[in-house]
Amino acid sequence: MLRVRNLAVHFPTRRGTVKAVNDVSFELNDGEILGLVGESGCGKSMTLLALMGLVPYPGETVAGEVRFQGRDLLKLGRDELRQVRGRQIAMIFQDPLTTLNPVFKVGEQIAEALRVHNILKPEKRGLFSRSASGTDAIREEVIRLMEAVGIPAPEQRLEEYPHQFSGGMQQRAIIAIALSCRPHLLLADEPTTALDVTVQAQILDLLRQINQKEGTGIILVTHNLAVAAEFCQRLAVMYAGQLMELGPTEAVIFDPIHPYTKGLLRSLPYLVPKGSPLVPIPGSVPDLAQLPRGCPYSSRCELATAACWEQSSPWVEVQPGHAARCWRST
Ligand SMILES: Nc1ncnc2c1ncn2[C@@H]1O[C@H](COP(=O)(O)OP(=O)(O)OP(=O)(O)O)[C@@H](O)[C@H]1O
Ligand code: SF4
Ligand SMILES: [Mg+2]
């Protein structure tokens, strides 16, 4: 479905060039759910934004290829990209609760998404205008979408404003907007972080249903490995702008290759067996404007050798479909 090669996003700053995404390559298979995990600031959001051509200024996608349905999205013009965005690829942005516009009714906002992409062409514009056949086509579609994402009493609730919705219901409305164009690919950036645990489970369940019913491919960004482990078929682990490990979820969780993945797993209370001590990773994440010449994890890695400091580490497939970027995996 999607093939990303050598993606790089840079931010020019006074301290130097911040390499927010550094040589990232991965694929998403048809109908697959891929988890993108890693600590805050490692480049997860920028990776998704780069796929959509939405890297914020002064950032820039300086290299890479993003193949989607036979085309390189990075080479598309603005108008062509706009056609793909929202229509074939939709994104649920991080901090979703600020995504909805507080001054428009929820129903209007879902209807607007349908209109922008000409999904249904009503005879005249204006909220829920009647089509030639006399049916209120957009209104019906909005209700169908609201029902599909589990918003109760959609006929009434489409007339309500975002502040009248709970956090979970707001997130459902955002998912309805994302799904309004029946995208092939959904990029979900921390879609449940702001929600409490029960609502979180409901939203993930909803995304899974969409994936199973519609075959929509999903890239789920989360810093919560437990959520990713439960939800995703494969996991990609990022650190300091680079992809460090990629493989089937079970293999990455139970048989990790990369020292960073191992360190991450040892430090998470919900993944460490009861009674075992938690082991934090020593040191701190390197400055993305002053990355070391070699492996960005070298200052924290107990296995680091001279090669690790000097040369960037190779991407090695250790098991079929399970690879890591580490000198020690060669
Ligand atoms: N305007 C900017 N100028 C300089 N650097 C930036 C700018 N915006 C983002 N960055 C850098 O890009 C890096 C990647 O940011 P990104 O938002 O992708 O992280 P993330 O993995 O999504 O983190 P989080 O889990 O906190 O959402 C960050 O370390 C940040 O320092
Ligand atoms: S390349 Fe070297 S420093 Fe980097 S993770 Fe592997 S062993 Fe550690
Ligand atoms: Mg982010």
Image (spheres, rainbow, N blue to C red):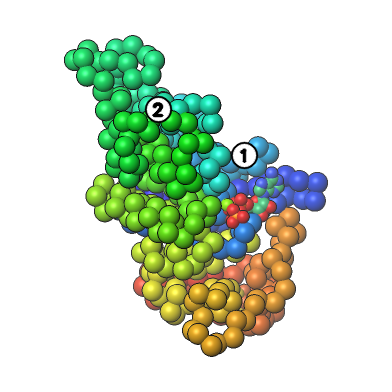
Label placed on residue 159: 2
Q: Could one spot residue 292 in this view of the protein? A: yes
Label placed on residue 222: none
Quick check: 134 above or below 45?
Answer: above
Q: Is residue 289 left or right of residue 116?
A: right
Residue drawn at (33%, 20%) of the image: 128
Mark in front: 1 vs 2:
2
Where residue 122 appears, x then y in whole percent? 30, 17
| View extreme (bottom): residue | 275
Does the CB distance between marks 1 and 2 fall below 8 Å? no
Q: Quadrant of residue 293?
A: bottom right
Quick check: 63 above or below 279?
Answer: above
What's the residue type where badge 2 is placed? Answer: Glu
Asked if the residue at label 1 sits under 8 Å from ligand 1, the reply is yes
- Which residue carries the number 1 mark? 56
Where residue 218 appears, x then y in whole percent? 38, 52
Observer-nearest of 91 and 123: 123
Label 1: few (<14), some or many (≥20) within 10 Å? few
Residue drawn at (49%, 41%) of the image: 52
Where residue 53 appears, x then y in whole percent? 52, 39
Label 2: few (<14), some or many (≥20) within 10 Å? few
Residue drawn at (29%, 53%) of the image: 209
Q: Could one spot residue 76 in this view of the protein? A: no
Observer-nearest of 214 and 268: 268
Residue drawn at (50%, 53%) of the image: 195
Q: Could you tell which of marks 1 and 2 lies nearer the N-terminus?
A: 1
